[in-house]
Image (cartoon, rainbow, N blue to C red):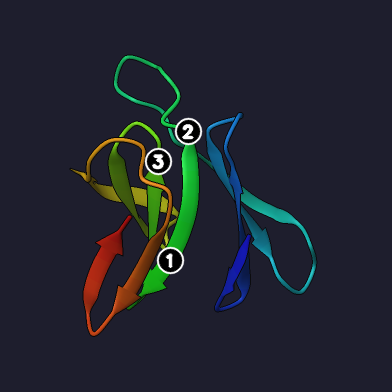
Amino acid sequence: MAIYGSKIYVIVNISSTVEAIDFRTGSSLKQIQMLAENGNSRQPRYIAFHKEKAYVCSYDGTVARIDTTSLEIDALTKAGRNPENICIQNDKLYVS
């Protein structure tokens, strides 16, 4: 779980979603589905933020970029097997 701007983001691994919640009201804004093209769970693990984007690493070896305004996935890249954490330093994304 992490706070960015006026939203709380909750990584829900087993349900393969990222839940975006309004910080002030506690109301759900959106459940962002983290599913592969074939419908399999990506199994999201961790989240990091940078310049109005959220980056979510998943056990399927991907990193999804989510626009924090539209709450839509706008890019996806491969990162290697079973990434366990993610961080951003000096405008660079690191996935372990």
Query: Type of residue at label 1?
Result: Ala
Which quadrant holds residue 2? bottom right
Residue 58, disc: 3
Q: Do tag 2 and tag 3 residues touch (Cβ < 8 Å)? A: yes
Residue 48, disc: 1
The mark nearer the N terminus, 3 or 1, is 1
Q: In what element is the residue under mark 2?
A: loop
Q: Quadrant of the C terminus?
A: bottom left
In the image, residue 29 sits, relative to residue 37, either above or below, namely: below
Q: Residue at x 61, y 76 (%)?
A: 6
The mark nearer the N terminus, 2 or 1, is 2
Residue at the extreme top of the image, as rendered:
38
Which quadrant holds residue 52? bottom left
Query: Type of residue at label 2?
Result: Gln
Is 63 positioned to the left or the right of 46 in the image?
left
- Look at the image and tell me whether residue 66 can be seen: yes
Percent coordinates x, y for residue 17 in the rendering: 54, 38
- Residue tagged 2: 43
Is disc 3 surrounded by few (<14), some (14 to 19) or many (20+) residues within 10 Å?
Answer: many
Q: In what element is the residue under mark 1?
A: strand
